[in-house]
Amino acid sequence: MTINEIIILLLGIAISVTLLLIFRRIFFGKKTVIEINKKVNSRELFESAQKSDDELNIDSKIGQESHDLIEDNVEYESVFREEENTNLITIHLEAEEHVFNYKELLDYLDKSQTSYKDEGGWLKIFLEDSDHFMFVNGLNPGKFSEEENILSTSIMTIIYSMKPKGNSVNALAEMIKFAERIAKDFSTQILDGDRNALTQQMVEHYSQIAEEFDLNNIS
């Protein structure tokens, strides 16, 4: 075999091996599929795929705030633990500034001859029939605290727990009278339980709830 024949043979082998590798890659190689959602523009694709460190920090902060909010809600509910697992009617009094000062509020209730009891940062307002509703700080932790320097708030919340054999309709009427007096003297807005402006329609709705509760719990 001559040198030329050897060279041709080696070239043939090389070409064969090259073709074999090409065919193997085409038919048996691992495929990478890239799907493009044409409904999303390229900027949105890059933003979702390449989240910055700042965004990751924000996500972490949101998670921590959610955890803190859960803890705050638990603490807030402890303010009226004796009323838990019952039907509640709630009215809010809201101002743009912290118009409700703890000590000034106590002085106001004293001067207006309101029958109340300070339960350590939140108040019980007594009715004539020995019933009561609660008057509490509408912001977490749900009460005033000299230790934590929580001495004023922009939102106060009135909470009534409907009880069997009680007079929920009368209590609701007293709640509304009390709320109207506070709103006038402190220049605040009366809101319903969802913190929307309290309307006559919502008052009638609350009255219906109270009446149905009383009728169902007479005995």
Image (cartoon, rainbow, N blue to C red):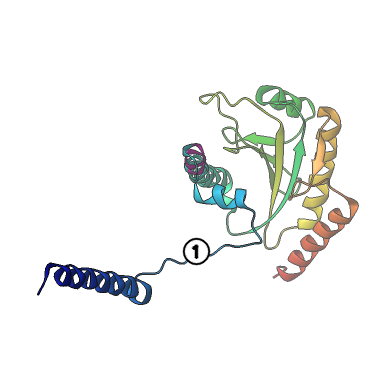
**Residue that badge 1 annotates:** 34
Q: How far from the left and from the top, in percent, is residue 133?
A: 70, 46
Q: Quadrant of residue 169?
A: bottom right
Q: Nearer the viewer, residue 69 or 218?
A: 69
In the image, is residue 57 part of the stretch drawn in magenta? Answer: yes
Q: How far from the left and from the top, in percent, is residue 180?
A: 85, 39
Q: Which residues are magenta?
A: 54-59
* The N terminus sits in image quarter: bottom left
Determine the secondary structure under disc 1. Answer: loop
Q: Residue at point 84% right, 55% down? A: 202
Q: How far from the left and from the top, in percent, is residue 46?
A: 55, 49
Q: Nearer the viewer, residue 147 or 44?
A: 44
Q: Judge left or right: residue 79 versus residue 168.
A: left
Q: Residue at point 69% right, 36% down? A: 116
Q: Quadrant of residue 166?
A: bottom right
Q: Nearer the viewer, residue 197 or 60?
A: 60
Q: Main secondary structure of the magenta part?
A: helix
Q: Residue at point 73% right, 70% down? A: 216
Q: How far from the left and from the top, in percent, is residue 190?
A: 81, 41
